[in-house]
Amino acid sequence: MAFSNINVQAFVKENAAVYPCSDVKSTRNGYHCKWLLLQSNAGGQIDRRIPLHTSTIDSATLQHLIVTKQAYPLPPDMEDVLEAMVVWGKRTDEEWYQHVLTTFSTLMEMGNQKTRKQLFQQCVEVRVFDIIMSQMLSPRLVQAMLIEWKLCFEDLYECRTRCYYQISIRSINYMDGCVRRLMMFGVVTPYTLFTPQITSSVTSEAEAGSAIPVVISSDSE
């Protein structure tokens, strides 16, 4: 079914206050975004989310996919996360990558808009939690490490960088440091650390900022 400009304009108007469309640039000719998130159906159930760069399709196809709700247009904050995950995160951990796509889909289906900070924290926490749970730790120690990372994230986002890639790299390195300390005190046994493969420029920066000072205060949240 072909859609005219009237159909597209009507859809844009109807969804002007509906997330994620409300957070995506639009004109009279439709939506403009860098990424779409396609829903792959199997047996009537969504089983996989597939990102599609809009440079690979024409404008008419882009509008058709959005208006027919076969795909979600990704808001800018999600695009920033996805680009890092496609280039680096997917190679680091395929399950993490798929979990992030599922998070995107769930948030958009529910119309649940998060701030950039909340979105970054939710996506990075998936990887951090996997690192922590790979160790045989008591529930109390798991909780303590999660709290320590959240303080670290707060410091990173508010004082150092708003780049998802940098926050992810530094978070993983920080949790590696926590595990190393636990190994020194004999709390956990040695394992293969989750240090990601990164470029030399990022490596030098990560090493220089690996010891992240965290100030615990009553208003850290």
Image (spheres, grey):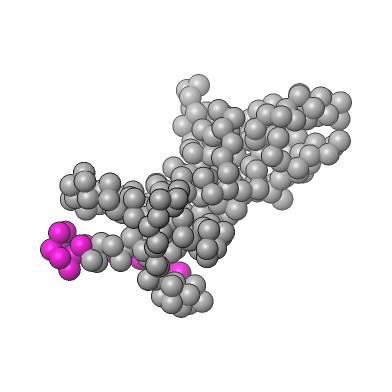
Q: Position of residue 185 (x, y in %)?
A: 15, 65
| On screen, residue 75 above or below 160 | above
Q: Is residue 25 magenta?
A: no
Residue 22 relative to residue 185: left or right: right
Q: Position of residue 39 (x, y in %)?
A: 56, 33
The residue positioned 36% from the left and 63% from the top of the image is 174
Q: Residue furthest front?
A: 218
Q: Position of residue 16 (x, y in %)?
A: 75, 30
Q: Quadrant of the N terminus?
A: top right
Q: Which residues are magenta?
A: 182-199
Q: Position of residue 67 (x, y in %)?
A: 72, 28
| On screen, residue 208 above or below 6 | below
Q: Is residue 58 visible?
A: yes
Residue 37 relative to residue 151: left or right: right
The foreground one among 62 and 138 is 138
The foreground one among 80 and 87 is 80
| On screen, residue 218 above or below 191 | above
Q: Quadrant of residue 194?
A: bottom left
Q: Is residue 183 magenta?
A: yes
The residue positioned 83% from the left and 39% from the top of the image is 27
